[in-house]
Image (tube, grey):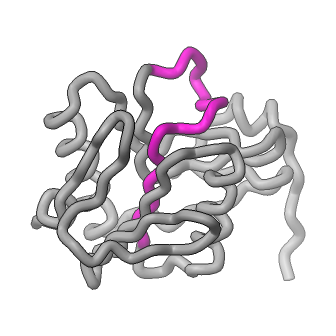
Amino acid sequence: MGIETLISVDDYLNTSYDPDVEFVDGVLVERNVGDWLHSLVQSNIIFALRRKYPSIKAVPELRSMVNPTRFRLPDVCVMLSAPTTSVLLEPPFVAIEILSEDDRMTRVIAKLKEYAGIGTPHIWLFDPRPRQMFLFRSNSLLEIEGDLISTDNPHLELTREEVFHE
């Protein structure tokens, strides 16, 4: 069993990591990166949202504070306006996670709960292999059976084809 070295929030925020890592209560948490389908879906989502809704900000992997000792990197953050800080300190309008082949659902659900806990109004989860789309509401995943996932006020939508096309 390895020994974890705890670091401070300031050290985390003032250090660059390649690939970037999340920060959970003093511990650096690696993420699954480098998966072709994950990267493709991430790119598709950002491209489609920027093309359809030029006034919003859709960005990959923006450090986001979910509590004072936890910072996550949603695969895509959607904001209605640009943040005023280099790290996102308020909830995004939409937090999006994309499953990689090696992701553990328990860890992903824990992250989704953290996004909900800070008041993120829309939380989406995409699984590229079976091409599934989910909403996370009331601590539960709701699979989208149709071909459209959307928000309200303002209305933003993505089609299954926009998300998963190769």
Task: Tell whether 102 sits left or right of 166.
Answer: right
Q: Return the x and y of residue 51 as percentages of the image width and height.
A: 15, 35
* Helix, strand or loop for the magenta stretch, by majority: loop
* Image quadrant in which you'd find residue 5: bottom right
Q: Return the x and y of residue 15 as percentages of the image width and height.
A: 67, 34
Residue 18 visible in the current orientation: no
Placement of the C terminus among the 4 image quadrants: bottom left
Q: Pick the residue in front: 165 or 142.
A: 142
Please give the range of residues in magenta.
82-99
Q: Return the x and y of residue 67 as percentages of the image width and height.
A: 78, 43
Q: Residue at x 63, y 49 (%)?
A: 72
Q: Which residue is drawn at 44% across and 65% down?
A: 135
Q: Residue at x 66, y 30 (%)?
A: 89
Q: Pick the residue in front: 116 or 107.
A: 116
Q: Pick the residue in front: 155 or 118.
A: 155
The answer to if 28 sits in the magenta stretch is: no
Q: How many labels does the image show?
A: 0
Q: Is residue 148 above or below residue 62?
A: below
Q: In this view, does 85 lie above or below 113?
A: above
Q: Residue at x 86, y 83 (%)?
A: 1
Residue reaching furthest top? 84
